């Protein structure tokens, strides 16, 4: 790894999923020299479909990647909700469930979004795969970084974009437990053969406290399978033990009908299962010294909101723009948080509660949810959820703007601040 310099300084970004390449894109545009380090050996392909909604669509447009995302758009036509015995409870349009806007918001396979983001920035920034941050030592003029490989380098700033279980956050802010908000569910996702003849649709089965979904992306021969269940406390003993995860899922869904036995068996055979608790990250501050967090590392909203990718894209834009608009990193990080936090918290609050939740835990709440679903139309809604568009993006920072002085932590000397606020 060679040292790279730029007029506005050097930035190390940890994580090459969504928030990482997005913030790298904007930082490069504003004149920073950016290095992205990723612990995986390459980009992570595959993954279930994810949404880009509301304000995040405008970020994608400004990145000039929106046409590519529209080409990859998953055209889901319906969501069929099923009773515990497999009988039909309701059929609704997918956007009516997630609060999206047909023709505006996009849903793409996760791997497609990461490929598009990487393609937009790979020729402009340095990517280092199969390595990660091992230690950080901040001093008056930068941050000394020791990598897992043993390489040591110095950067002016560090951005943690390494997800819900961020190691950067742990190094700088302390254990994850301080910021982890468990939402009462665990889930497993994996792929399995599409032996059901499903196309462009989702089947969602529910029993009190348990749910299963089969997601057909187009006419693929594979389905994205999903198993979700309520649990009072997170199963700490299973979070790092794949065999314990399979055993827990099998025990939880034992005795359930429909296609549940086949799904549980498929999870045991799958080579790509992913298991975790359903959680949010809530932090009192997203930066400390010369280190800032973005995306799930700072404010994971959980998949229950469907807003993780959108918050990552918007947060990346706001963070880089703040660094471009202010002379010192201290003022820039403060502006990033001031102008973005309201939007983040509004979207984190979209998690349903009680009988309004997508995955009710009692028979009474489940019946109330089904009754509400039967009242929805099978046509796409005309408007989305207000939270998705509750932030008006500030203009892009022009090349004539004075940028952040990475060696200074003082106030914004030219008096300009970004004006994006949650409405």
Image: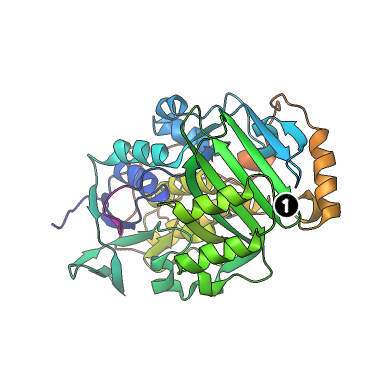
**Magenta stretch holds residue 130:** no
- Nearer-the-camera pick, 196 or 148: 196
Can residue 393 be seen by looking at this rendering?
A: no
Q: Give the class, few, some or many, for how many residues have Cα within 10 Å of label 1's Cα (few <14, many ≥20).
A: few
**Magenta stretch holds residue 41:** yes
Can residue 365 be seen by looking at this rendering?
A: yes
* Count of residue discs: 1
Image position, residue 181 (x, y; %): 61, 66
Q: Secondary structure at mark 1?
A: loop
Image position, residue 295 (x, y; %): 48, 53
Image position, residue 236 (x, y; %): 54, 73
Which stretch appears magenta?
37-43
Identity of the residue furthest to the left in this view: 2
Residue visible at 83% across and 54% down in the picture: 363
Residue 337 in the figure: left or right of residue 88 = left
Residue visible at 31% across and 47% down in the picture: 43
Image position, residue 270 (x, y; %): 44, 51
Residue 248 in the figure: left or right of residue 269 = right
Residue 8 in the figure: left or right of residue 277 = left
Magenta span: predominant SS is: loop
- Nearer-the-camera pick, 328 or 168: 168
Residue 12: image quadrant is: bottom left
Q: Is residue 317 above or below residue 382?
A: below
Residue visible at 33% across and 63% down in the picture: 408
Question: Which residue corresponds to mark 1?
Answer: 352
């Amino acid at each position: 790894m060679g040292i790279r310099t730029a007029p506005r300084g050097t930035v190390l970004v940890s994580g090459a999923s969504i928030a990482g390449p997005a913030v790298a894109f904007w930082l490069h545009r504003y004149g920073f020299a950016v290095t992205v380090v990723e612990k995986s050996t390459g980009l992570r392909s595959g993954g279930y479909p994810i949404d880009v909604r509301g304000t995040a669509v405008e970020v994608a447009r400004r990145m000039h990647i929106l046409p590519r995302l529209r080409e990859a758009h998953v055209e889901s036509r319906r969501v069929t909700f099923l009773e515990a015995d497999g009988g039909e409870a309701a059929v609704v349009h997918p956007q009516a469930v997630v609060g999206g806007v047909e023709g505006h918001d996009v849903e793409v396979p996760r791997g497609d979004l990461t490929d598009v983001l990487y393609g937009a920035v790979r020729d402009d920034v340095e990517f280092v795969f199969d390595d990660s941050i091992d230690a950080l030592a901040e001093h008056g003029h930068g941050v000394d970084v020791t990598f897992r490989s043993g390489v040591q380098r110095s950067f002016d700033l560090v951005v943690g974009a390494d997800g819900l279980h961020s190691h950067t956050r742990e190094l700088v802010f302390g254990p994850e437990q301080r910021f982890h908000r468990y939402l009462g569910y665990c889930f497993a996702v994996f792929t399995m053969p599409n032996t059901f003849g499903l196309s462009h649709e989702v089947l969602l089965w529910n029993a009190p406290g348990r749910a299963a979904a089969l997601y057909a992306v187009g006419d693929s021969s594979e389905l994205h399978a999903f198993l979700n269940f309520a649990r009072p406390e997170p199963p700490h003993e299973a979070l790092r033990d794949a065999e314990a995860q399979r055993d827990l899922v099998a025990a939880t869904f034992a005795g359930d009908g429909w296609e549940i036995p086949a799904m549980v068996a498929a999870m045991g055979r799958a080579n790509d299962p992913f298991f975790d608790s359903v959680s949010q990250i809530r932090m009192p501050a997203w930066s400390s010294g010369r280190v800032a967090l973005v995306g799930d590392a700072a404010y994971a909203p959980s998949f229950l909101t469907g807003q993780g990718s959108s918050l990552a894209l918007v947060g990346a834009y706001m963070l880089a723009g703040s660094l471009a608009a202010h002379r010192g990193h201290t003022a820039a990080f403060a502006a990033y948080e001031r102008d973005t936090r309201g939007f983040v918290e509004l979207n984190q609050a979209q998690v349903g509660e009680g009988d309004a939740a997508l995955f009710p835990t009692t028979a009474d709440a489940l019946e109330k949810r089904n009754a509400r679903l039967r009242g929805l139309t099978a046509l796409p809604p005309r408007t989305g959820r207000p939270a998705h568009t509750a932030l008006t993006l500030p203009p892009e920072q022009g090349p004539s703007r004075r940028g952040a002085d990475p060696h200074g932590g003082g106030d914004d000397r030219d008096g300009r601040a970004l004006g994006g606020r949650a409405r």
